[in-house]
Amino acid sequence: MLALVCLAALTFTAEGLDLDPVHTALKKIGDAGTNWPAEQAARQQLVALGEPVVRTLQRELATIDDARVRRACYDILCASFAQDERTPAILVAGLGDKDDGIRYVTAFQLGTLKAYAAHRQLQVVADDTKESTDVRLAAAKSLAELGESHSLRLLYQGATADRYMERYMASIGLKALSGKNLDDFGGYSYAEGCFVSSGLEISVPFDALQEAERKANRFAAAVAYFGWLKAERPDLYKHLTPSFSRNR
């Protein structure tokens, strides 16, 4: 009996370190620092553990001090445990994380995962003018994917913005709500020659004439799309008409 007790103790502690498999993998992610291959290996180790990972993260994710480890956890939840019924609730909690990147990821993913129960929390984020534009637009995009049309003004702003990521999120939201977006009019493409690589937004080199032409094409597509929306989907367009309600 004593041997069994000792063996059980060794399963969890050795030289003061927690050897629970989930916590061990989390520690490896933290220790990896900027060593991406090491972090990737630790992430794969965590995913391989299955259901206990979600159970542990639901209980303890908010207590992890390292924002990089928390971001890795949210990435893993969305990529490998999206079908777990506990994942949406964990993501909703992430909307209040102090890290801007985590708030962005969770706001974006809740719509992708069709987490309908999250619509009130997402609306709070979309309405928060102190929040970053990307996080607010991610929330607006997700609201649109959940069938909520109240953030159409935010989607309009995103669709006509100069930045690629704003147009990207708005395009997803408009398509989810109406079945069309600006790309369906006049051969326009929301990308406008820009893209994202390793988290960095890459834009085409500045040229005054080309910049003016890109903007002209963007707003011509906007006129066509929103004209179509007014004619074919007045139930949606009403959110874009003048009113004395709060600006969303």
Image (cartoon, rainbow, N blue to C red):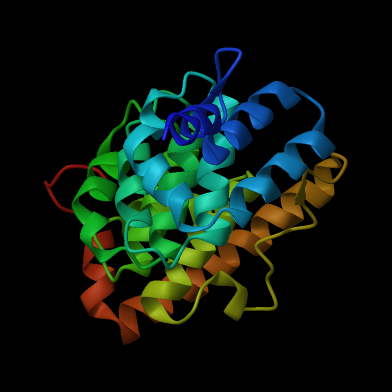
Q: Is residue 192 in sight in this rendering?
A: yes
Numbered-mark total: 0
- Residue 4 placement (x, y as % from top left): 47, 36
- Taking the image as shown, residue 149 lies to the left or right of residue 33, namely left
Give 212 or 75, whichever is nearer the viewer: 75
Q: Position of residue 116 (x, y in %)?
A: 26, 65
Query: Split into 4 quadrants, where in the image is the N terminus?
Result: top left
- Measuring from the top left, give residue 163's x and y in whole percent: 63, 44
Residue at the far bottom in the pictured view: 232
Q: In the displayed structure, does residue 82 sit left or right of residue 31? A: left
**Vertical position of residue 206 compared to residue 141: above or below:** above
Q: Nearer the viewer, residue 222 or 119?
A: 119
Q: What residue appears at the point 84 percent right and 46 percent down from the top-left corner?
A: 204
Which sits in the foreground, 151 or 205? 151
- Give the answer, above or below, for where 25 lies relative to 105: above
Q: Is residue 138 visible?
A: no
Q: Could you say where residue 236 lies in the image, as x and y percent from the top left?
A: 27, 72
Give the residue at x 59% y 80%.
Answer: 184
